[in-house]
Image (tube, rainbow, N blue to C red):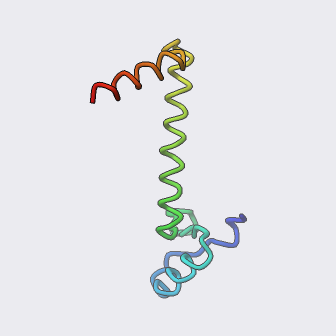
Amino acid sequence: MKYSTQIKPISYLKANAAEVVRQLSAQREPLVITQNGEAKAVIQDIATYEETQETLALLKILALGNRQIEEGKVTPAADAIRRLRGKKAHD
């Protein structure tokens, strides 16, 4: 995706807000908003935003898992399964 085609000044956003929202939903590409020639904000459709948040959450979980492995905070799979089965039997 080339962000260079998705750059608009804030004045364009002010004048064309409804059309911008329609395009964001249809194209599912972020739009960079500039102010005084500098990039100041990025807007995107809600579906893409939610997907991004889910992806970030998964990446955080993976990073936490990797950190725990590096710190030696691991349990053999057989032990974990046995412990889970034991809890299930007591419920």
What percent of the width, then of the height, locates residue 14? Answer: 45, 82
- Viewer-nearest residue: 3 or 72: 72
- Viewer-nearest residue: 5 or 64: 64
For image coordinates 40% across by 19% down, the residue present is: 83
State the image quarter where residue 7 is shown: bottom right
Q: Is residue 49 above or below residue 9?
A: above
Residue furthest left in the image: 91
What percent of the width, then of the height, locates residue 34? Answer: 54, 69
Is residue 74 visible to us here?
no
Q: Is residue 71 above or below residue 2?
A: above
Residue furthest front in the image: 89
Horizontal side of residue 70 vs 83, given as left or right: right
Q: Is residue 77 above or below residue 13?
A: above
Image label count: 0
For image coordinates 41% across by 25% down, the residue present is: 85
Query: Which image quadrant: the C terminus?
Result: top left
What percent of the width, then of the height, locates residue 53? Answer: 48, 53
For image coordinates 54% across by 69% down, the residue present is: 33
Residue furthest top in the image: 72
Horizontal side of residue 26 vs 91, given as left or right: right
Query: Which image quadrant: the N terminus?
Result: bottom right
Horizontal side of residue 88 vs 55, given as left or right: left
What percent of the width, then of the height, locates residue 32? Answer: 57, 67
